[in-house]
Image (cartoon, rainbow, N blue to C red):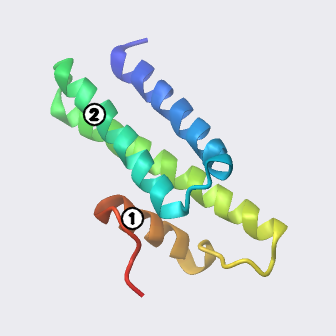
Amino acid sequence: MELTEVTKEIGKSVIEALEADTESQKLDDAEHIVRIRGIVRAIAAFLEREKVASKRRDLLEQELKAFAREVFLQRCQAARAVDEDADSLEEDGAGGKYFDHVYKHGREPRR
């Protein structure tokens, strides 16, 4: 397996572990997403130091972000299934928009 594939699989494992750990760490969603963004950027920086071509780094960074977004949305959906009265970030694509905003800006959207 080549370096980018190994790195991608490690990145996915870290993202899954952090997602599973969110409850015990008492992080709100924005803090969690910013933490994930830091991990993804650190992986991209590692690949840059290893002289991996920028197109491959960018693609891997996009794949890891998309993976993290999907795992986040699955958690939102599972939380809603448990508590029907809970605010849902999954309705009308709100969860994806929320994730994208926090990932890009590092903070929650203004209300």
Residue at position x 35%, y 44% in the image: 38
Would you identify the image quadrant in which residue 40 lies? top left
Residue under numbered circle 1: 102
Residue under numbered circle 2: 44
Image vertical order of residue 45 relative to residue 24, above or below: above
Image vertical order of residue 45 relative to residue 28, above or below: above
Residue at position x 37%, y 48% in the image: 37
SS at circle 2: helix
Checking the image for residue 93, the label placed there is: none
Q: With 13 as the anchor, is 23 left or right in this view?
A: right
Q: Position of residue 64 (x, y in %)?
A: 42, 41
Q: With 75 as the anchor, is 5 left or right in this view?
A: left
- Category of crowding for the residue at label 1, using alpha-carbon neighbours closer than 10 angstroms: few (below 14), some (14–19), many (at least 20): some
- Category of crowding for the residue at label 2, using alpha-carbon neighbours closer than 10 angstroms: few (below 14), some (14–19), many (at least 20): many
Would you identify the image quadrant in which residue 34 lies? bottom left
How far apart marks 2 and 1 lie (CA) works out to: 19 Å
Residue at position x 81%, y 77% in the image: 84
- Quarter of the picture containing the C terminus is bottom left
Q: Position of residue 46 (x, y in %)?
A: 26, 25
Q: With 107 as the anchor, is 72 left or right in this view?
A: right
Question: Earlier along the polypeptide chain: callout 2 or callout 1?
Answer: 2
Q: Position of residue 65 (x, y in %)?
A: 41, 48
Q: Position of residue 17 (x, y in %)?
A: 60, 36
Residue at position x 55%, y 62% in the image: 28
- Quarter of the picture containing the N terminus is top left
SS at circle 1: helix
The amino acid at mark 1 is: Val
The amino acid at mark 2 is: Ala
